[in-house]
Image: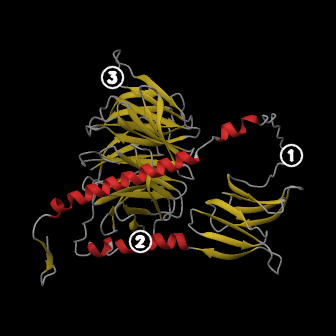
């Protein structure tokens, strides 16, 4: 075998390499197996006894009785971390009330109460000299505080930003262009004129959620009048009016087969109703109990599986036949407010009050990516039609577009005249339009590529609490605290 480089740096081979190297590769494999066997044999020789056998002659320990001697009261929110000082008297604790407290455990007095720059703290530490404490969390910064400043007060000593720096560097390498620059050659979209074609009247209290059926005709809505209503949007008639066990409902969902609907709220239960019972009336199919916080959102994968999110900071995958949780998705440090399923039903996005969004794999229950950028709670998330990106809506008055492949935010949608939060979002069928429901009673429409606001839909007399676009992209439905649903096109 021989090889050479031509003037164009093309590597040429006289004949295939694998035929000549097959024997050499086989010899290497055999050598690797022999080395593995030698390692196993060496471990077995050193394993001449077990810890259980060696300690079998020791007397068993008596029952240990530990009693609480002190209770340290002062934090106003969840405590996430603590660490003892080296002198066995003081300890430091970190809480999401935004405080780092150094305690005298003998007297239960606070030695120091240190305000943190970010309340999303996850860890703290006490230096061996007891001269410094440190904390860190979702701000990606390790903040170190000096407890022995000359002035007597606690001062921040330094902030270590290395973690976020490496992530930013990696993201910047892939961020070779901006969405605004790439789309600058596109013509601006004309002003969109959507008109309300139907008004669905029947709820007697605030509407909190809605979801379209897969056939683009029916939708289900949930209201705090204690009713779940399935509507025929063509005729505006009620197909089903389902009384709920709890009127404090926050979410509803329509199964892809249109055979089931689901709802949940402050009762912490996901209730599923069958619309195709033999008797003709709607019956409760099952109740899924497992969350320890309110149910904020739920979405069907199919008739037998549903994903839910909760105020207990988790999401869950349920088997509706066995009524058991098949998977729990833990990782958020705040209430999970919204979820969006991918078109293949293999992944979903979650948005939470920790101002982050996460990408989850339903099959293994693991978080694959975490996206940050918002300054306040994320209330709504929605997959882009091709599943390569997603949008979020937040209380910070912005919507943002995140590219999953680039692992970063690529567009922010904001307007100087908008200062209120977003409750719900949805994409048009093509993805060119992003629609958002706002607390200012309007639905704002954005050009996804250019970031321009191209329409404002006014018609409700209170907060737009929910919205959705049909699968065929032909209609938009909005629900409001004014008790009405409107269908636009």
Percent of width and height locating residue 214 = 28, 38
Percent of width and height locating residue 179 = 31, 71
Percent of width and height locating residue 402 = 38, 62
Residue 365 visible? yes
Up the image or down, 98 lies above or below 318; here it is below
From the viewer's perspective, is the residue at label 1 or at label 3 nearer?
Answer: 1
Q: Distance between the residues labelled 2 and 1?
A: 50 Å
Q: In this view, does 195 lie to the left or right of 96?
A: left
Farthest residue in the bottom direction? 7
Q: Distance between the residues labelled 2 and 3?
A: 52 Å
Q: What element carries label 3?
A: loop
From the viewer's perspective, is the residue at label 2 or at label 3 nearer?
Answer: 2
The crowding category of the residue bearing disc 1, from other C-alpha atoms within 10 Å (few below 14, some 14 to 19, many at least 20), is few
Q: What element carries label 2?
A: helix
Marks 2 and 1, the one that precedes in the sequence: 1
Up the image or down, 9 lies above or below 252; here it is below
Labels 2 and 3 touching (C-beta < 8 A): no
Q: Is mark 1 on a helix, strand or loop?
A: loop
Q: Name the residue at 82% across, 34% down.
A: 62
Residue that badge 2 annotates: 170
Q: Name the residue at 41% across, 71% down.
A: 170
Nearest the viewer among 191 and 137 is: 137
Q: Distance between the residues labelled 1 and 3?
A: 59 Å
Residue that badge 3 annotates: 276
The crowding category of the residue bearing disc 3, from other C-alpha atoms within 10 Å (few below 14, some 14 to 19, many at least 20), is few
Which quarter of the figure is the N terminus placed in? bottom left
Residue that badge 1 annotates: 69
Marks 1 and 3, the one that precedes in the sequence: 1
The crowding category of the residue bearing disc 2, from other C-alpha atoms within 10 Å (few below 14, some 14 to 19, many at least 20), is few
């Amino acid at each position: 075998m021989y090889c050479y480089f031509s003037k164009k740096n093309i590597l040429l081979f006289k004949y295939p390499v694998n035929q000549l190297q097959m024997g050499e590769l086989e010899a290497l494999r055999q050598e690797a197996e022999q080395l593995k066997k030698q390692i196993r044999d060496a471990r077995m020789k050193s394993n001449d006894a077990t810890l259980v056998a060696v300690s079998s002659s020791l007397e068993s320990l008596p029952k240990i009785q530990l009693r609480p001697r002190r209770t340290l009261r002062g934090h106003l929110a969840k405590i996430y971390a603590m660490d003892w000082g080296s002198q066995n008297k003081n300890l430091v604790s970190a809480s999401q009330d935004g405080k780092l407290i150094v305690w005298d455990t003998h007297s239960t007095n606070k030695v120091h109460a240190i305000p943190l720059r970010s309340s999303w703290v996850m860890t703290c530490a006490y230096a061996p000299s007891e001269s410094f404490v440190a904390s860190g969390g979702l701000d990606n910064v390790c903040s170190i505080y000096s407890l022995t400043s000359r002035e007597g007060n606690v001062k921040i000593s330094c902030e270590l930003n290395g973690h976020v720096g490496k992530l930013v560097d990696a993201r910047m390498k892939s961020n070779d262009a901006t969405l605004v620059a790439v789309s600058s050659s596109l013509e601006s979209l004309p002003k969109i004129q959507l008109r309300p074609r139907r008004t669905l009247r029947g709820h007697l209290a605030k509407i909190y959620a809605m979801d379209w059926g897969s056939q683009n005709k029916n939708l289900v809505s949930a209201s705090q009048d204690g009713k779940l209503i399935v509507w025929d949007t063509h005729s505006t008639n009620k197909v089903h009016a389902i009384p709920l066990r709890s009127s404090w409902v926050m979410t509803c969902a329509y199964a892809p087969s249109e055979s089931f609907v689901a709802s949940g709220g402050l009762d912490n239960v996901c209730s599923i109703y069958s619309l195709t019972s033999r008797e003709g009336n709607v019956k409760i199919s099952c109740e899924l109990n497992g969350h320890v916080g309110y149910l904020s959102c739920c979405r069907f994968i199919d008739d037998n599986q549903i994903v839910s999110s909760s105020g207990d900071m988790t999401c869950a995958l349920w088997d509706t036949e066995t009524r058991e949780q098949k998977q729990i998705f833990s990782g958020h440090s705040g209430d999970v407010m919204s979820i969006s399923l991918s078109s293949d039903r293999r992944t979903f996005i979650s948005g939470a009050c920790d101002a982050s969004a996460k990408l989850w794999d339903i099959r293994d229950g693991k978080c694959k990516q975490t996206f940050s950028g918002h300054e306040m709670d994320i209330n709504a998330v929605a997959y882009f039609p091709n599943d390569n990106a997603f949008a979020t809506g937040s209380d910070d008055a912005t919507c943002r577009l995140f590219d999953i492949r680039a692992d970063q935010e690529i567009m922010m949608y904001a307007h100087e005249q908008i200062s209120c939060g977003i409750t719900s979002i949805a994409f048009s069928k093509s993805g060119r339009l992003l629609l958002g429901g706002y607390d200012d009673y309007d639905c704002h429409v954005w050009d996804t590529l250019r970031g321009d606001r191209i329409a404002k839909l006014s018609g409700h007399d209170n907060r737009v609490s929910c919205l959705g676009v049909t699968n065929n992209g032909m209609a938009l439905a909005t629900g409001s605290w004014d008790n009405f649903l409107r269908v636009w096109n």
